[in-house]
Image: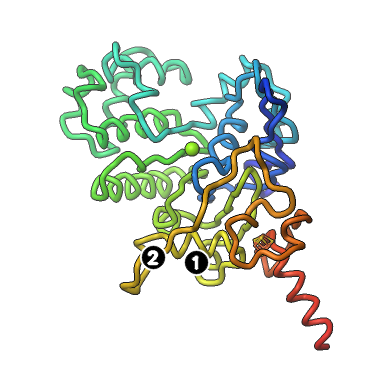
């Protein structure tokens, strides 16, 4: 079994007063050991819900996760909350966009790190403290011993994110899920944090599931990429193919609207319109209202995710039309 994580036909539904809505709709993908897989898309595309579903963090009061999530052969959807809690942080760790929301403001950095390390290891308090200081140093935090006694609000955003990464990596997880880890940070700090994640990955062979709206981050970090739109995967390929031979009109739009990737001095492109609300999904191709190539078929029939090359999949009717032309030509 070469995969560490296998997600199959994941569906995450939310139950509301207005009905049942799918935030994630039939998503399948795999993650290999040591691989960095990017999940990209605008906000509202279902990327974060996908990661929260894997972590078992969808509230049971109004949400339901269907399908299969295999981690190391273990079916996560069958685990109890207690078993999931043990897995979280220990084997699958997560860092978020705004560390302030995951750090407790009333405890010192040292307190939180020691507690988190002890929760997942059998280290003594003294050993855990030593480990915490080591980790803070590893993520490039100066004066690590002093920072241990400080509170989250005393640190800058970049420092807080380093602390979160130190905390996440201190239990040597096999998977790190990073949801917009650098979005709240300025460009210089962002580059430092990405460097740090790359180095940690090299040292520990941790697999990373990197969730971002930023294709610049994907280009720098990822081996493979999944593009999500309106709860579905619309394209999947290795990172070179995504940037050099994108297939799906949505992926092409995302690339054209990413400043770091544009060589020309033309005005930056922006995809017209917005991601549809999960309560108002268009029938047919969900991207059709924003797609310059949309045909009548696109408005009425849902395209499937199909192979368009080696390890390259796309969900677009244009490919079938091309196939048809090829067949007719032959
Ligand atoms: Fe555009 Fe049609 Fe392809 Fe959807 S299926 S992305 S509307 S061309
Ligand atoms: Mg998100």
Quadrant holding the C terminus: bottom right
Residue at x-position 68% and y-position 25%: 18
Side of 103 relative to 152 (left or right) = right
Say few, some or many: other residues with alpha carbon within 10 Å of mark 1 (under 14 / 14 to 19 / 20 or more). some
Which is nearer the eye, 91 or 227? 227
Side of 55 relative to 147 (left or right) = right
Residue at x-position 38% and y-position 23%: 101
**112 w.r.t. 295: above or below:** above
Residue at x-position 72% and y-position 57%: 299
Whether the residues at callouts 1 and 2 have beta carbons within 8 Å, the answer is: yes
**The quadrant where residue 10 appears:** top right
Side of 231 relative to 184 (left or right) = right
Alpha carbon separation for disc pair 1 and 2:
9 Å
Q: Which residue is mark 2?
A: 261
**309 w.r.t. 25: above or below:** below
Which is nearer the eye, 198 or 103? 103
On the question of residue 176 being in view, the answer is no
Q: Is mark 1 within 8 Å of ligand 1?
A: no
**Percent x, y of residue 194:** 35, 48
Which is nearer the eye, 137 or 300? 300
SS under mark 2: helix
Q: Which residue is mark 1?
A: 243
Which numbered circle lies on residue 324?
A: none
SS under mark 1: helix
**Percent x, y of residue 261:** 38, 65
């Amino acid at each position: 079994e070469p995969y560490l994580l296998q997600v199959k036909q994941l569906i995450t539904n939310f139950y509301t007063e207005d009905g049942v809505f799918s935030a994630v709709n039939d998503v399948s993908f795999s993650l290999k050991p040591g691989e960095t897989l990017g999940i990209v898309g605008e906000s509202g595309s279902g990327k974060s819900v996908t990661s929260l579903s894997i972590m078992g963090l969808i509230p049971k009061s109004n949400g339901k996760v269907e399908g299969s999530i295999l981690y190391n052969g273990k079916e996560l959807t069958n685990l109890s909350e207690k078993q999931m809690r043990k897995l979280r942080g220990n084997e699958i760790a997560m860092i978020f966009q705004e560390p302030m929301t995951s750090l407790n403001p009333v405890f010192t950095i040292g307190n939180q790190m020691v507690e988190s390390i002890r929760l997942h290891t059998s280290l003594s308090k003294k050993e855990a403290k030593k480990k915490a200081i080591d980790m803070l140093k590893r993520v490039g935090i100066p004066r690590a011993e002093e920072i241990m006694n400080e509170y989250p609000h005393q640190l800058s955003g970049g420092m807080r994110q380093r602390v979160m990464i130190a905390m996440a990596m201190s239990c040597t997880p096999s998977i790190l899920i990073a949801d917009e880890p650098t979005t709240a940070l300025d460009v210089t700090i962002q580059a430092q944090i990405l460097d740090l994640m790359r180095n940690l990955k090299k040292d520990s062979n941790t697999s990373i599931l990197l969730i971002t709206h930023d294709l610049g981050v994907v280009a720098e970090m990822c081996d493979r990429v999944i593009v999500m739109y309106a709860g579905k995967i619309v394209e999947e390929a290795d990172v070179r193919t995504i940037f050099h031979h994108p297939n799906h009109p949505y992926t092409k739009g995302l690339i054209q609207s990413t400043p770091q990737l544009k060589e020309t001095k033309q005005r930056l492109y922006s995809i017209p319109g917005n991601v549809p609300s999960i309560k108002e999904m268009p029938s047919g191709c969900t991207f059709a209202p924003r797609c310059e190539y949309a045909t009548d078929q696109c408005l009425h029939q849902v395209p499937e995710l199909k192979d368009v090359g080696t390890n390259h999949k796309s969900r677009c009717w244009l490919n079938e039309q091309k196939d048809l032309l090829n067949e007719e030509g032959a």
